[in-house]
Amino acid sequence: MSSTAHGSTPYYFVPSESRHPAFAALGLFFVILGAGQWVNGADWGKYSLFFGLALWLGVLYQWFGDAISESEGGQYGHKIDLSYRWSMSWFIFSEVMFFGAFFSALWWARSHSVPMLGSLDNALLWPDFKAVWPSMAAGMTASPAGIIEPFQTMTPFWLPTINTALLLSSGVTLTVAHHAIRENHRSTAIKFMWLTVLLGVVFLFVQGYEYYHAYHEMNLKLTSGIYGSTFFMLTGFHGFHVFLGMLMLLVITLRLQKGHFTADKHFGFEGAAWYWHFVDVVWLGLYILIYWL
């Protein structure tokens, strides 16, 4: 377990063999399989999706429990703390690249693909097509062949603006909780952590209502051309990340209630806070580029 021990804490802790990575990968496999089939009209896809989510969440519950037991058992020293910080930093960097790819796709579609379809070379094929991004002109679907049903575009008022206020407020409450735990005010930290979790849950419900409104009242769907696909991919993946971040914060809050973490040693708290602030920043980019421009 360690090469050199310092007191009761090993210099570097090496965990035993675990089944968790394999089962987590299996759960995600069924999630992706089910989601892909469901959006393409296969009714069984939803069952695969929900089964995969249940399996994946069950694995996370057990995996988090093992890591918590190791941490509270005094197995994590400075080297493990440092490795966790680097791991979380690289994970968030990979998420930056993930969303950067979708933001780049949005930029390329708006700045290159749509103008190209309206160029002189394509004017003979689609003489009535106007190369205008849907949010820039009412009724435009960016479909030169006319195969996209008319739809309305999203505006920042009012649901997206409400969600922006919710996420920004959650960032403030999380920061207050962080300062509270650093000053050893556990009860204050717990109160503001519960408030942060609640704000995250409300955000998800508001986004769910926004999707319902988009599909049933605006006819804006995943199949609504490049506008619909980029809108739902960006906002949908962000919503999934909010869900993950909310789960992290919920686990941290429950751990705080059990007496875990100290004023000097609480990276589990800090790692979840880093992730949540990242989610906030991504949403600000979405709010400006998707809803305002």
Image (cartoon, grey):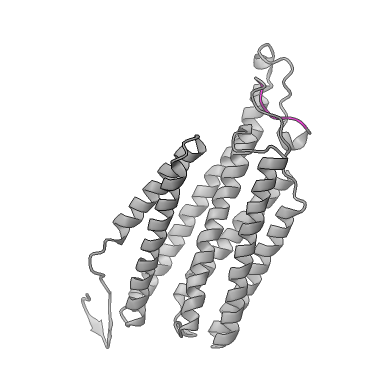
Image position of 71 (left or right of 219): left
Q: Quadrant of residue 133?
A: top right
Image position of 99 (left or right of 50): right
Q: Is residue 76 visible?
A: no
Task: Locate residue 17, reporting x and y percent.
Answer: 23, 65
Q: Which residue is drawn at 60% across and 55% down?
A: 282
Magenta run includes residue 141: yes
Task: Locate residue 134, reporting x and y percent.
Answer: 72, 34
Q: Can residue 121 be seen in this view?
A: yes
Query: Which SS does the magenta portion mostly show?
Result: loop
Magenta run includes residue 13: no
Task: Locate residue 113, reporting x and y percent.
Answer: 62, 28
* Front position in the image: 41 or 153: 41
Report the label total: 0
Q: What stretch is highlighted in magenta?
A: 139-144
Q: Report the quarter where the N terminus lies.
A: bottom left
Q: In this view, does 128 lie above or below 277?
A: above
Q: In this view, does 38 lie above or below 88?
A: above
Q: Quadrant of residue 8?
A: bottom left
Q: Report the quarter where the C terminus lies.
A: top right
Task: Locate residue 176, reporting x and y percent.
Answer: 62, 78
Q: Residue at x 32, y 82 (%)?
A: 73
Q: In this view, does 170 lie above or below 54?
A: below
